[in-house]
Image (tube, rainbow, N blue to C red):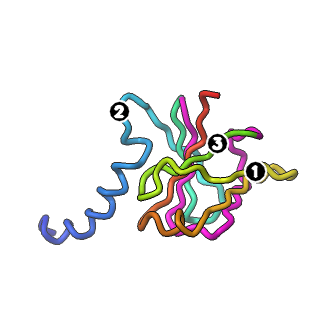
Amino acid sequence: MENSTLSPLNQPLNRLSRHHPRHRAGQPARRRQITPGEGDVVRFTQTPSAFYITTLAAPNATLDIASPVPYQHGDRVTVVGGSKSGAVVPSQLLRNGTLRLQVSEEIQKADQYAWVFKIALDR
């Protein structure tokens, strides 16, 4: 395939990669194991200072993460990338250990290809 054929396919991926935590300079990141309970669209990435939840499909108003994540009561979850980058997402840890994110309609519409949520680990 020639470059002109791949360009339209790569454009969304290139825009996404600018906001992805692995792209941030000086922050070695590692992917975490994909957990079957989260489906095919949720991924996790971790750097020394943050834990990232990425969903490859627009989230609903409530995004429940059943996998163990390094979230503690009172932690702030923020949006990474898109037009709502930096916005705080209301979150809570349920009794069963599930992390629940309340995703506003504005945040749902703020991106096109992937939605990234950050839990800061430098508490």
C-alpha gap between disc 2 and disc 1: 30 Å
Residue beneath disc 3: 76
Q: How many residues crowd around disc 2 within 10 Å: few (fewer than 14), some, or many (20 or more)? A: few
Residue at the location (68% across, 65% down)?
62
Residue beneath disc 2: 25
Mark 3 and mark 2 lie on one chain; the one further toward the N terminus is 2
Q: From the viewer's perspective, is residue 44 above or below residue 105? A: above
Q: Quadrant of the N terminus?
A: bottom left
Residue beneath disc 1: 92
C-alpha gap between disc 3 and disc 2: 23 Å
- Where is residue 57? Give x, y as percent: 52, 68
Mark 1 and mark 3 lie on one chain; the one further toward the N terminus is 3
Q: Which amino acid type is shown beneath numbered disc 2?
A: Ala
Q: How many residues crowd around disc 3 within 10 Å: few (fewer than 14), some, or many (20 or more)? A: some
As helix, strand or loop, the secondary structure at mark 2 comes to loop
Residue at the location (48% across, 69% down)?
109
Q: Which amino acid type is shown beneath numbered disc 1?
A: Gln
Mark 2 and mark 1 lie on one chain; the one further toward the N terminus is 2
Q: Which residues are magenta?
A: 49-73
